[in-house]
Each structure stands twice: as structure tokens, then as C-alpha cells.
Image: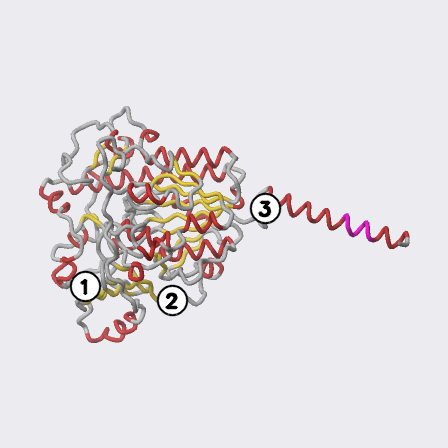
Amino acid sequence: MATSTRTTFLFLMAVLLCLQGNTCDAKDSGQPDAKPNILFIAIDDLNDWTGMLKGNPQARTPHMDRLAAKGIVFKNAHCAAPACGPSRSAIMSGIRPSTSGNYINKSSLIHNPILNNSVLLPEFFQQNGYYVCGAGKLFHGYHFNEEVKGRGFDEYFPSKTQDLPSFEGLKFSSKLPLGGWARQADWGPCHPDVTVDDHPDGKTTNWAKEKLLGGELQEPFFLGAGIFQPHLPNYAPQEYFDRFPLETIKLPEGYREGDLDDVPAAHAKMAHNPWLKRIRATNQWKPAIQAYLACTSMVDDLIGQIVDALESSKYADNTIIVLWSDHGFQLGEKERWAKYSLWERATRVNLVWVAPGVTNPGTVTNKPVNLLDIYPTLASLTGCKPPEGQLEGNDLSVLMKDVDAAWDEATVTTFGYKNYGVRSERYRYIVYENETEELYDHTKDKWEWKNLADNPEYAEIKKKMRKTLPTHHEPYGVTYVPPKRNRNGSKK
């Protein structure tokens, strides 16, 4: 080889090796050409009483609002189902309740053959080379966690076989208002000796902070932090109750006497608990609202701590944040103290994304979207090929890149067999199994007080919205039967 040719060859080889070295260094240092990490934050029973959704002017959520300002807020986001179990099963599988037959909390994700044979979200990322860890309520219920923790999770806090301490271990400063009248239906400030760190949600938060600040997470990682509050029972330290003096508490603006007079009787066949009746009879409506606001404020503080830990870590520039609540909650509206309905307060959720290099700070969209969209969006943002034929949601990165992009005109929530709520930018349409209907125009009636379904002027609107309904309606799936246990808690 001639000297000049050899010199040129060696020079080119050196450049190539340098470029290869730079590529490897970039991946090691978490630069954009490496797969992004994921911080996956779940909140239970949080409705639109947040600053970013403006559902209640008394709500105070500065940390979530600050996070929202860093990315995109989907103001018209809705759950796949207004109950913890089927909502989370849909998020984690990407499969609609009407496809799986998983309609109620008693229908197990694991014992449902359609869901059990799916690739769950943690499994998906583990299969794509991610380190997957989690804590708190990500799936529904302790018995679900017990069986799911081993599927896709490399690590679960405190372990794959042990859950966080329950609320029963907390001490209280006074007698609880309802005295444990109904399971979960209670609230109250914790004893002064109890700090946020003693609370199960505080433990989940501290675990997440330690993981992020420790700097030893294997990348890319999927870190899930499931916050239980403001799900009942609403327990929080006194300082959070003090933020909302009882004399300042107002009843929900969306409550109206006689609101159900023009609503089909089919709504009553849905899960309907007697909590509101008891709360009103004991003059506890405002104290109960105070407790919900207090617990929401505590949740906001904890989320702020997790996000601050990420921003202080070496992972800050290459981590996607998705924050979601599994469904809404009615605090008296429509005569309910629960989720379990197809009305706005029960289906509307908080959904915030911060994706480095994709989302633009301060973006807001009113396009109708669904929690089903989380799985396909994460697959798209990470460049991982989704499970073939499984996912039924949409890729939200389309809207992240262009909020004016073409999009579905409506999104669907399912609650029970053949009961559907359809939400567009303007209307909510509800159809029950017996074909009775509701229709609300949100430009004129945000509290859904006037049912327009029988008005012939809206026949075409209803016809158009019906086209979005699922064409397949899977019968109720297998009902979960908890394993019998010995007195020491082990399975028989």
C-alpha cells in the first residue's frame, strides 16, 4: 500500500473509531440518542380538582401545575373505565374493557384469559431492554399486585411478595367521623406524631426519590410510582387539613337538587354506594370535601418531591414523565360519592406528559383522548415496536408534535356490559345496555344538568357519536376468587 494511501486509510479509521467512541459515550451519559427513561406516576381517584383542570377553585396543586407547565396537558382526557380495576387493566394491557370483558373491580386481570395472555406494559419494557421497577398502587388491589409484581418487574418495593403497610397502622388525633361505618368510607387528620414519611404514599415517594437521586439505576429504566390518595379513606397529617379551614369549604358547584330527574333509570343499575346519603345525614359533607382537598394537597407535595428528585438527578434530560389519574370522583354531584358512572366528573382524568425533545412547555389541548393511549404513546416515544394486534389506543405523540393534527373526534369510556360514555370536544353522549340515552352540550352545560337526548334537533349528533362505539362487546370475564389464607396470612 502506498504511503499516501496508507495515511489516508489510517486517518479514516481514526475518525471512524472516534465517532464510534462518541456514540458509545453519548449512550452512557444519557444523551438523546440513547433510549429515554420513563417516570410513570399514577394517582388514585383524583378528579379534575387540580389547578391545571380548574374543576374546583379551592383546590391547590402547585407542583402538578408546575409539571404541567413543562410539557403538555390533555384537558379532555378520560378513563377507559370509571373503576380502579378495569381502568388500570386497560392502561397496563392497552385493551378496552369491551374487548377483554374486564368491566368491574372483581374481574381479575390475571384470571381474565384475554388480559392474562397480553403483554403487560412492564413486561413490554422489560422485553425491550429496560430495567423495570415500581412501588405503590400501579395495578389494582393487593391481590393483583401479589400476582403481577413478578410479571415484568425487576424490582418492586418493598418486595415482590410484600406490600406497603396499610392505613390501619396510622394513629389519629380524634375519632373518625363515620367510625368505620363502611369499608374505606372515612377520613381524618393523623395524630401529630404521624408524619408524611409514615404514610404509605410517603414511603412510595421516598423510595422513588432514593432511586432517582442514588444515580445507580440501570438505563434505560421504567420507574413506576403509584400514589393511593385521594382514594378513600382520606387520611393525611393535620398540616394538610389546616390548608383548607372548614369554614371556607364550599359544596361542589356541579351539585344540583333534582339533577337526576331527566336521567334514564338505567344509571341506578350501576355500582352505587350509600355513602353520600350517610355523609349528608350526619352533616359531614363539608368535612369530607375538606379531607379530599387535604389529601389531594398532600399528593401534590409528594409528586413535587419525586419530580424535584428527577430534575436533580443525572437522568433529568433523558426521562419521559407521564402523570395520570385512573378516573375521576364525584363528591355529591349526581347524588354520588364515588366514581362508578359515565358522567364527566367520574371519567375525566389528569394526564400530563413531559417528553424531552418532543413536548413543548405550556402546551394544552382539548382533543378527546383516553388512558388507553398511554401504552402506544410510550412505545412510540421510546422507539419500541408495540405488541402486534394488541393495543387499541392512539399514539399521543402525534398531538405532542402538532396539537392541530388530525385526530379522532371522540373517545369512549366503558362501564359494564354495553354501557358507554362518548366524549367529543363539545358533547358527552351516554348509551346504556337497554338503549336509553343521555346527551350534554358542554359549551352550554358543563355540569351536565340538562339531558338533550330526547330533543330531535340532536338526532344527527347522537348518530355521529354512536359510530365511535365498540362493535364487539365481550361478556363479563372470569370473576376473581381470592385465595384462602391461613391465620398467618400465607396461602392455603
At horizontal 29% and vertical 34% (from top left) the residue drawn is: 240
Do residues under tags 2 and 3 come within 8 Å of each other at their CB atoms? no
Residue 16 or residue 474, whichever sits in front: 474
Quarter of the image holding residue 158? top left
**What separation in Å lies between label 3 and label 1 (alpha carbons)?**
53 Å
- Residues 83 and 127: in front is 127
Q: What stretch is highlighted in magenta?
A: 9-14
From the viewer's perspective, tell me whether residue 196 is left or right of residue 396.
left
Amino acid type indicated by mark 2: Asp
Q: For the N terminus, give its image quadrant.
A: bottom right
Which numbered disc flags the more N-terminal residue, 3 or 1? 3
Q: Which of 34 and 189 is in front in this view?
A: 34
| Location of mark 2 (residue) | 408
Specify which label sits upstream in the sequence, 1 or 2: 2
Indicate which label's residue lies in the foreground, 1 or 2. Answer: 2
- Looking at the image, is mark 2 or mark 3 earlier in the sequence? 3
Residue 329 in the image: above or below residue 415: above
Percent from the top left, x then y, of residue 445? 24, 61
Q: For numbered disc 2, what is the local secondary structure?
A: loop
- Amino acid on which disc 1 is placed: Lys
Question: Is residue 353 located in the magenta-colored stretch of the structure?
Answer: no
The chief SS type of the magenta part is: helix
Percent of width and height locating residue 215: 52, 35
Mark 1 surroundings: few (<14), some (14-19) or many (≥20) residues within 10 A: some
Q: Nearer the viewer, mark 3 or mark 1?
A: 3
Q: Can residue 423 be seen in this view?
A: yes
Q: Could you say where residue 160 lies in the image, as x and y percent from the top left?
A: 37, 38
Q: Mark 3 points at which residue?
A: 31
Callout 1 secondary element: loop
- Which residue is identified by label 1? 450
